[in-house]
Amino acid sequence: MSREYKVTAVFILSAIAIVALCATSCSTEAPWETKKVELKMNIKTVSAGFIECSFSTNKNAYYLIAIEPAKKGEDPMKHQKQFMMLALDSANLEYIAWRNDLLKSGEMNVAPFASHALQYGDVTHFFTGLQPETEYWLYAFVVDPDKMQSAGKLYLANVKTTEQSVVDVYFEYRVKGYWDYIYPVDSLGNIHSHFPYLTLTEDSQYIADEVHSTPEEYFTDYFLDAMKKNESDMIRYGVNADLHDGRLGDLFFEEGHTYYTAIVGFDGFIGNNVIYKFKWTDEDFEAYFKNEDSIVDYGEDD
């Protein structure tokens, strides 16, 4: 599997991607102001599929943060009030849909709009699901949660995502009984919860039947083709766990069968690839893999 093999990311973005959840410190009982509030945005990381940005205010205040694809020929700063009103309306519609779903499911303790859709205090947020080499409007503004109105000016940055990832992520993998777990980590071993990746586990017998061959070099092509066909449905973030006992999905770990798990970074291109191979025995089976165990990079037969 070549690290230069590029695939166009297919993501579904709403017209305005409003951040739906705020920090746990959010509470409508917390003190807040709307006058003479200054808001700062500090963009920390711009990659192909995500943007990291920190926000802070000089006074306690509620504020909305959001991102949307930039529209050519338009400048939100020239019609700030209208732009902020539309952003608040969109956030409110998303909140109502979220609230109604909870109420229908029997959950009566539903957070108020401010706690669900607004930020409070210092916040660092990752905007994910973005497309490579695309211009975005990343913006924020203070909100009066009682009146559901914007307060003050619009803070906006024009940001263009990169062609491919600017961060290194490594994929560690664990199989324990019928469960398997994926851990995307940085060079220090810390979990990277905002890097997009694809993963697929298959029985070697199934792959051999599909590609009409048994050599492992053909298996990598199988995984690439399978992921390209389903990439928009397979994107994961952070630690991932899957159950393979026949109750969820189609895959069932069977005694004596050999399995391959492919994991590829998907931040604008297929890279950071690994394919791990293991022979499953029984419900007490346990194995742990790191990058050096990948048969892609090292060609080792586990």
Image: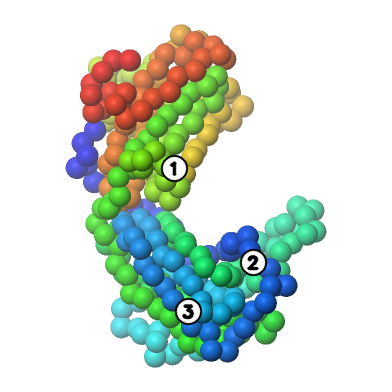
Would you place residue 33 above or below residue 185 in this image?
A: below
Q: Residue at x 70, y 58 (%)?
A: 101
Q: Which residue is mark 3?
A: 39
The residue closer to the viewer here, 3 or 55, is 55
The location of residue 178, given as percent across then percent down, is 55, 22
Counting residues from the start of the chain, the first of labels 3 and 2 encountered is 2
Q: What amino acid is at disc 2?
A: Cys
Q: Residue at x 48, y 87 (%)?
A: 153
Q: Which residue is mark 2?
A: 26
The location of residue 257, given as percent across then percent down, is 44, 12
Would you place residue 162 above or below residue 122 in this image?
A: above
The location of residue 235, given as percent across then percent down, is 43, 45
Q: Does dot 3 land on a helix, a strand or a loop?
A: strand
Would you place residue 274 above or below residue 287 in this image?
A: below
The residue closer to the viewer here, 214 or 256, is 256
Q: What amino acid is at disc 1?
A: Ile
Which residue in the rendered view is the most extreme toward the front? 58
Q: What amino acid is at disc 3?
A: Leu
Counting residues from the start of the chain, the first of labels 2 and 1 encountered is 2
Q: Does dot 1 land on a helix, a strand or a loop?
A: loop
Q: Residue at x 40, y 61 (%)?
A: 52
